[in-house]
Amino acid sequence: MAEQRIGVCNLCEATCGLLLTIEDGRVTGARGNPDDPLSRGHICPKGVAIGDIHADPDRLRRPVRRTGRGADARWEEIGWDEALDLVADGIARTINEHGDDALALYLGNPNAHSLGALTHGIAVAQTFRTRNKFSATSVDQLPHQLIGHLLYGHQLLLPVPDIDRTSYFLVLGANPMASNGSLMTVPDFPGRLRELQARGGRMVVFDPRRTETARVADEHHFVRPGTDAWVLLAMLHTLFAEGLTTPPSYVDGLDDVEAALAGFTPEAAEQASGVPAEVIVRVARELAAADGAAAYGRMGVSTQEFGLVCQWAVQLLNLVTGNTDRVGGAMLTSPAIDAVGRGLLGRGHYDRFRSRVRQAPEFGGELPVAVLREEIETPGEGQVRALLTIAGNPVLSTPDGAALDKALEGLDFCVAVDIYLNETTRHADVILPPTTLLERDHYDLPFHVLAVRDTARFTPAIFPKGRDQRHDWEIFRDLYVRVAKRLHRKPPLKRRLLTEARLRLSPTFAIGMLLRTGRSGVTISQLRKHPEGVDIGALRGGQLPGRLFTKDKRIAALPDLVAGDLDRLRAQELPTGDELLLIGRRHQRDCNSWMHNTDRLTKGKPRHHLLMHPADLDARGLRDGALVTVTSRVGKVEVEVRATEDVMPGVVSLPHGYGHQREGVRLGVATGVAGVSINDLTDPERLDVSGNAALSGVPVTVG
């Protein structure tokens, strides 16, 4: 008999509410929940396919141990106690014999979407004293977090566009029509955009590709990859030169900002970026004149060599036009659980230590993932000899994945907490699979902090976990106890007992306590009665400077790190000759590097092609549909090319997340889903000053 249950799709930051039809222990239907106060009935193809993950025959449900390597690798199921003991033995042996730094950790994107990973996984990761900690943060969003730390005193005190009330939405290098927002939780972006335009508002997009978002924008302008900083700085230059700045009183150092902008004129920006100077000037004036405006930059401006400058300029555009902390501008949230204000999410710190080989600076206790391979391959004290990955696939999602893939073969020990055998976890000696989306309770700690409306929602598990399954928080709890007992240098007894006691508390209990001690008045009992969510209200202005985490409750407008990088930008040599610049792209049916084994999401027209402008094809004597070789400094791939005017001349585009089936290993990639990994071409030597990988604007040749 069919039953309808309220669920949530926590595959991406939109966290849309769902109405699920359940029959015989399976999801037979999924649609958006119209009563959800944030997502308002919206659903995308990933939400429709959420039941496919639960029923996926490729999904691991019990621990597996690898025997043999490469083509001889075989996998056998083992019990939880045996698996956890094997893992604890391997981790403790590595640390005891080679020191703390011999263990590396990598946390993938799905950790932010699992309550248990947030409450228990990160806590356990912090107990390891290794400096070799990495995460997906340095793949795509580190400049955003670092500039939040430098300007506002906290890496996640990030104003988000008040899209429900703005009249002018300036978008650079972001595609919310496909992503439903990133570091801006904005489900039902298509509906919200229609409402913006219906009230007379406008959306202006700058992007080297005519994305799904650019197609529905009021204006779209092509910009050469890696040159967005020139455009943004020229807009700031215009505002200062024309006396259009109206900054709040708590911002210091604007005279220094104006002086630092010398030379970043609209004319210079046109030469660098290809965007006409008159367009840059006009958009800057419109932003300043609008009754509530918000500038927003995301993946395309973060994943380049001047990502920090770009994100700084975006924040400055909002600040100096008076649109920060203003209705219709860029505003702070007031979530029921203020994970920022409560100290649940660290403020961040920069350059307290550096990587062993390249001397790359840390941020928030993590090193740039682009240096992971060299830390594995380079002999000496502190060499990485063991790796623990948690819900991550860095072989597909980080620069020069092919080289990292090879490096992982040389590890002494590798373990993964993951539900799939994939390009990375195939190297693991043991895989510990947790329950997944529909089998665990959920509350969004980070994404309520970044949402365009204040709401609260607790979603109980749809299905009970199986007798032989464990939640991720239970895996972390038991692993901590086992490893701590085996270490020669054990944690202090009091600390160990306190940690064990904390880890015994379920994530749901923790959420109940955090709500009870908060100021919103929302309780876990109330949320259980209203699983569709509780509406707290529109974003509130007037929160600054009171909520700043800076010592003096003021904003220093020109951090030293940014000032130094402006000098580097001035000296930048722009690409010349017949070199093409590679960018990525995402699709609404993709979820980063996974869900490519779901027929529902992979059927239809292939999406893996290299996109290339017809003029660039003609110049090289290539034809539409041909198999071409794309070559960068670090590697080459073969892929079919598709002619399109949706990319500007001089730009080619490959999607992120596609990989290969490798001999002897069944991976989570559907038969017939062709494609290559863009990160077999991206270059780990190209980093932003923050340490973020510069995945966009990679010079390539196509032939």
Image (tube, grey):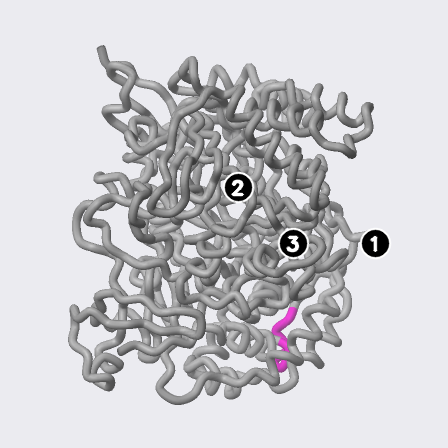
Which amino acid, mark 1? Answer: Asp
N-term mark: 1 or 2:
2
Residue 414: numbered disc: 2
Looking at the rendered image, the quarter that the C terminus falls into is: bottom left
Q: CA distance from mark 1 to mark 2?
A: 46 Å
The secondary element bearing badge 3 is classed as: loop
Q: Residue 62 in magenta?
A: no
The secondary element bearing badge 2 is classed as: strand
Task: Out of 93 and 298, give the one closest to the viewer.
Answer: 93
Q: Residue at x 41, y 61 (%)?
A: 679
Residue 552: numbered disc: 1
Q: Residue at x 75, y 63 (%)?
A: 556
Q: Position of residue 675 (x, y in %)?
A: 27, 57
Q: Residue at x 72, y 25 (%)?
A: 499
Q: Position of residue 38 (x, y in %)?
A: 44, 36
Q: CA distance from mark 2 to mark 3?
A: 14 Å
Question: Residue 39 sits in which quadrant?
Answer: top left
Which amino acid, mark 2? Answer: Cys
Which amino acid, mark 3? Answer: Gln
Outermost residue to the top: 1
The secondary element bearing badge 1 is classed as: loop
Q: Residue at x 43, y 88 (%)?
A: 576
Looking at the rendered image, the quarter that the N terminus falls into is: top left
Question: Residue 438 sits in which quadrant?
Answer: top left
Name the residue that disc number 3 marks: 383
- Are the residues flagged by discs 1 and 3 in contact, CB closer than 8 Å? no
Q: What predominant SS class does the magenta segment belong to?
A: loop
